[in-house]
Amino acid sequence: MGRFTLGAAALLALGIAGCRPRPAVPPPPAVLSLSLVAVGDILMHQDVQAAAAKDSEGFQALWADLVPLFQSTDLAFGNLETPIAPTTGRPGIPFQFNAPEGLPSALRASGFTVLSTANNHAFDQGRQGVCETLDRLRAERLVVVGSGEDRAKAESLQILERQGVRVAFLAFTDLFNLDLNHRAMEPWVRPLELEPTLQAVREARGLADLVVVSVHWGNEYQHTPTKRQRDIARGLVNAGCDVILGHHPHVLQPVELMEVDGRRALVAYSLGNFISNQDRMYRADLFPVAGGDNRDGAALKLRFERRPGTGGRDRVVLAESSVEPLWTENNWGATATRREIRVIRVAAAEARVRVQLDQLSDPIEGTKLLPDATARRALILEKQERLRTLILRRKHIAEVVGESFVVR
């Protein structure tokens, strides 16, 4: 009996001790995360401007599908391949662009934060056009990289801080239609000259947590990067670049990861066109897939995290990378009286069309939606053709940029 009482007492004591409140364990610190979305060439062909002029929402309506994505990210980048010089320039003509005064505010309202102006169309409206473009973009609090009122300003390092991360942006062009870089005190567009470019990246590496380089390079309409592109990309990464955002070919090129000294960098050789009037005659039922390559686009989505590094210093690393396929819908040649050009997110559009087809094909729901059987069959055929186009574009984009980057 005594042994039983002692054992019970011991168990009771243990139970009491076990009921004592334990000191609260603090939750792990939140992981610092920064997001970046980048798209390719913003081209202002006459029909693109006409489509914006006919819509009450203006330019923003042309890429309304992308606005939630741009506005939800910390930094949104695009290559602005046009001057905006309605006062000092001439009306745009084929291969020599000019955009209206409403474009900067539309870009800002859409969520864009950083624009490269270092490209082969930068001098389309002369030196004055460069200055007016800069004035109009800065008035909308857009960060401009790659050009300036003089050489020093064009080459000044732009560092943005988001989520406690310092991000350096640099921009260069390997091509000029018209090169007016004659005197350092005049308007300047930053050229891609290898040693000065590498030195600029090295300097940025010492001042920022992330270094993002925009490069206008490569051969038009070719999906394969040139040896020059690959060599320069390797040099930029070795110098300290974390992300390379390429453009100019007007078609997509591969995305790849590079490892240097334990650091992982991402190279997007060409993000293709964001918006344009190119390949306007393409129809998936009449032309091979390659006939629509200029209307393919990509939203490159990157996420970075701050993590412990060596020597007690944190480092910001690439945590996630993916490509969302984009497609420019274009009603050129249609009987409609209004010109319509729209950039859409392919996966979301594909999902919507599948739902619509299911509803139209349902014996009960289909009749409610469209009682006329002949009209309903015609609409089903139209939706099926649109679905086929979206599937073709999604698969083709994945083949070009890399299947591993495109998530269904």
Image (spheres, rainbow, N blue to C red):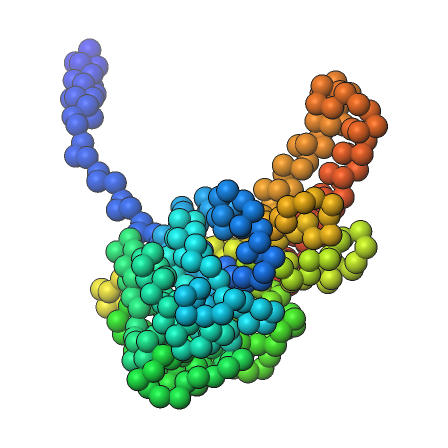
**Residue 293 image position (x, y, % from top left):** 67, 62
Is 357 or 368 nearer to us in this picture?
A: 368
Q: Residue furthest top?
A: 1
Q: Is residue 224 left or right of residue 3?
A: right
* Residue 352 in picture, x, y percent from top left: 63, 36
Q: In this view of the protein, which residue sits in the foreground, 30 or 150?
A: 150
The residue most toward the right is 374
In the picture, the quarter occupied by the N terminus is: top left
Query: What percent of the width, then of the height, locates residue 148?
Result: 34, 74
- Report if residue 315 is visible in the image: no
Whether residue 293 is visible to the viewer of this picture, yes or no, is yes
Residue at image x 31%, y 59%?
139
- The structure residue drawn at horizontal position 78% and vertical position 60%, both measured from the top left corner, is 288
The part of the image, by quadrant, that contains residue 360 is top right
Pinpoint residue 170: horizontal percent, then vertical percent.
37, 72
Query: Which residue is located at x 62 percent, y 66 percent?
Result: 251
Q: Residue at x 40, y 46 (%)?
A: 72
Q: Is residue 125 above or below residue 79?
A: below
Front residue of this view, candidates 190 and 14: 190
Residue 61 relative to residue 181: left or right: right
Q: Please tell me which residue lies in front, 340 or 89.
A: 89
Task: Judge whether 367 appears above or below 266 on screen.
Answer: above
The relative height of residue 323 versus residue 156 in the rendered view (above or below) is above
Marks counted in the figure total: 0
- Which quadrant of the figure has residue 395? bottom right
